Image (cartoon, rainbow, N blue to C red):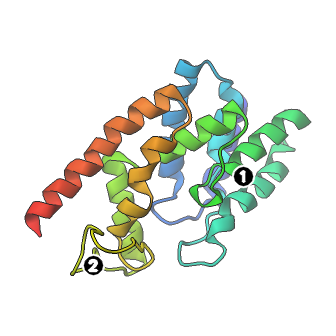
Amino acid sequence: MKVLDSLKNEIIKIMNNDSAHDFEHVMRVYKNAQKICKKEKANEKLILSAVLLHDIVSYPKSDKRSKFSSIESAKKSKQILKKYDYTDDEITIICDAIKDHSFSQNKIPVTLEGKILQDADRLDALGAIGIARVFATGGSLKRPFYNFNDPFCKTRIPDDKIWTLDHFFQKLLKLESLMNTPSGKIEAKKRTKVLRDFLNQLKQEL
């Protein structure tokens, strides 16, 4: 699909996000979405378009506007998509998927396209790459790795705005149960095991 190549070329020029939400992240989500699309027999053009555009606005996690990144991405995506051969209905489906995909929005997308984008994006927060992204973000925000007195949140509520490791307990370990599609759930289970194995190893080292 030539339109996807055109979108890629446009997006790579305008994205200037942190290393956890850069163009390489977009392409990993793209690969995840392709796999899910094949298994779920979904519309690749709409889903992969949404994937390419889903993080074109990504405020830093320390920014108060961070939770609105997906909403702003949807607005900007609408303007970009109007330049290409998409119908109004297709643009609505794509932009709604982008708007609702974010964990911070706390929404379950209505459409299959939205569900697959959300699953594909969340898979990149799990597994080995998910671990790398967590600590890349924590490092950029100069957060300590963990709470010295209770690293694994045994007796306290996780706070990932202070300690990086808390993000596992506040968000990442919950994602497997929040996946929308059967194929997304299967892959999330595999990747969540990687997180648990990492935490078990870390316990032995601390």
User: Which residue is disc 1 drawn over?
Assistant: 99
Secondary structure at numbered mark 2: loop
Q: Do the residues labelled 2 and 1 touch (CB within 8 Å)?
A: no
Residue at the spot 38% in from the left edge and 48% down from the top edge: 126
For the C terminus, the image quarter is bottom left
Task: Give the Cα separation between the discs numbered 2 and 1.
Answer: 33 Å
Residue 162 seen in the figure: yes
Location of residue 84 in the rendering, given as x and y in whole percent from the top left corner? 83, 38
Q: Please say if 166 is above or below 20.
A: below
Location of residue 41 in the rendering, given as x and y in whole percent from the top left corner? 61, 18
Q: Nearer the viewer, residue 137 or 11?
A: 137
Amino acid at the residue labelled 1: Lys
Asked where in the image residue 5 lies, by quadrant, the reply is top right
Residue at the spot 43% in from the left edge and 63% down from the top edge: 170
Location of residue 102 in the rendering, given as x and y in whole percent from the top left corner? 61, 54
User: Is 169 left, or right, of 204 in this rendering?
Assistant: right
Q: Please say if 146 is above or below 53.
A: below
Q: Please say if 29 is above or below 65.
A: above
Q: Which of 70 and 110 is in front in this view?
A: 110
Amino acid at the residue labelled 2: Asn
User: Which residue is disc 2 drawn over?
Assistant: 147
Binning the other alpha carbons within 10 Å of mark 1 as few (below 14), some (14 to 19) or many (20 upward) gives many
